[in-house]
Image (tube, rainbow, N blue to C red):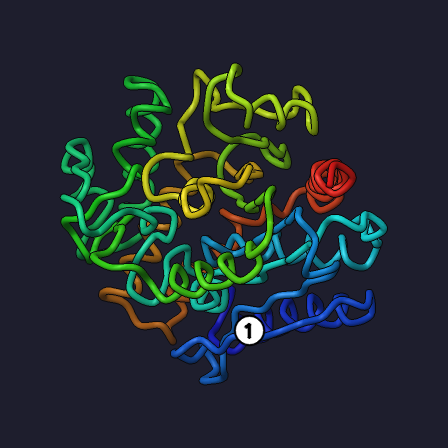
Amino acid sequence: MLDLKTMAKRYHAARAAFLDNAERAGWKTESILHPLPGPDGGPLHMDLAFSGAREAQDLLMISSGTHGIEGYLGSQIQSRLLEEGVINQATPGQQTVMIHAVNPYGFAWHRRVNEDNVDLNRNFIDFGKPLPVNEGYADFYDILNPQTWDEGHSARLKQEAAEAIARMGLAAVFQAVSGGQYTHPEGLQYGGVEPSWSRRTIEALWARFMTGKIRATQIDLHTGLGETGEGVLMTYGEESQPRIRRARAMWGDILVSPPADGPDVLAQGVLGPHLEGLFPKAEVLAVLLEYGTVAPEDVVAAIAADNWLHRFGDLKSAQAGRIKQMMLDAFYADAPGFAEKTYKRARDVVAAASNAG
């Protein structure tokens, strides 16, 4: 069971490991202070480590923690990549940047969302246009956003989710539940009404490091969807497009674009495609490396419980500790070989992108 002090220690330990490994590897580091504190009242940061010549024309960016708590695996992978020297910095034409904890608030507080209950991968939209409408969300609103929470509700939610998946298919349920919504700020999968702190910060970093670049690869690390320990590399587009041909040249059949029988996790508002659009004259390829953890209904139950907790619950209670443990279990699988298996896939993906620079 997790408490606020333990959560803070986990976040600070992950951050320290990343920065220490970066410095030992000879990378430069910077830290950007988040405006709000962590569970222990201490500061939170989006950290970056970078190496390679600034005048290089090729950029490789690897980011973690866009979905907060998913950063525990992403951070572990980034730290080990640095420790083992996987990035090929002998390539003179490439600069590499690692972004640690795109969403430091969610990372430290063991949440998938940010400080405003915003799912960052639904926040990268044009807020100057009419907001997207998710008509299917209303069908699941009550079960996803209860005013009370107990084991009985958790069991009912899991059962309803499993039945809906069996009836509608995972892709349809994913779109309704996780496709993003902009009408219920208190609810799950809220996309916000304006660019978030994390979005503004990473946009500024992207503009800074993309200056003078003609080509870039952006890899965003995620967990919570798929078979336990399996890493699926996803993007969007047709096989005939140059960006997909370039991706195939690097990764071959590892790449999925997107899974025809599964959910499209690169729907509207996602970080990678948004970054691609900011530099349309450059050859930018954004991909998402998604790792499976537990069953989809267990993931949904965890984020619904966590949402209830931050709306109605007591963060210092024993129930809060159990819910935060649910969140950790949902996004970092405590399974034999999980850490090694997930790292191996990431190492292969990153090494291919680095050597292609």
Q: Amino acid at mark 1?
A: Thr
Q: Secondary structure at mark 1?
A: helix
**At 30% from the left edge and 59% from the top edge, which residue is drawn?**
195
Residue 290 visible to an observer of this rendering: no
Residue closest to the eye, 125 or 119:
125
Q: Position of residue 53 (x, y in %)?
A: 73, 60
- Quarter of the rendering containing residue 335: top right
**At 44% from the left edge and 58% from the top edge, which residue is drawn?**
203
Mark 1: give few (<14), some (14-19) or many (20+) Cα within 10 Å: some
**At 38% from the left edge and 47% from the top edge, which residue is drawn?**
121
Q: How many marks?
A: 1
**At 81% from the left edge and 53% from the top edge, which residue is drawn?**
89
- Quarter of the rendering containing residue 51: bottom right
Residue closest to the eye, 78 or 223:
78
Q: Position of residue 141 (x, y in %)?
A: 18, 42
**Quadrant placement of the C terminus:** top right
- Please say if 60 is above or below 186: above
- Quarter of the rendering containing residue 14: bottom right
Residue 33 visible to an observer of this rendering: yes
| Residue bearing the label numbered 1 | 6
Q: Position of residue 37 (x, y in %)?
A: 42, 80
Q: Position of residue 323 (x, y in %)?
A: 41, 58
Name the side, left or right, on which 69 lies relative to 62: left
Residue closest to the eye, 241 or 110:
241
- Please say if 255 is above or below 201: above
Residue closest to the eye, 39 or 203:
203
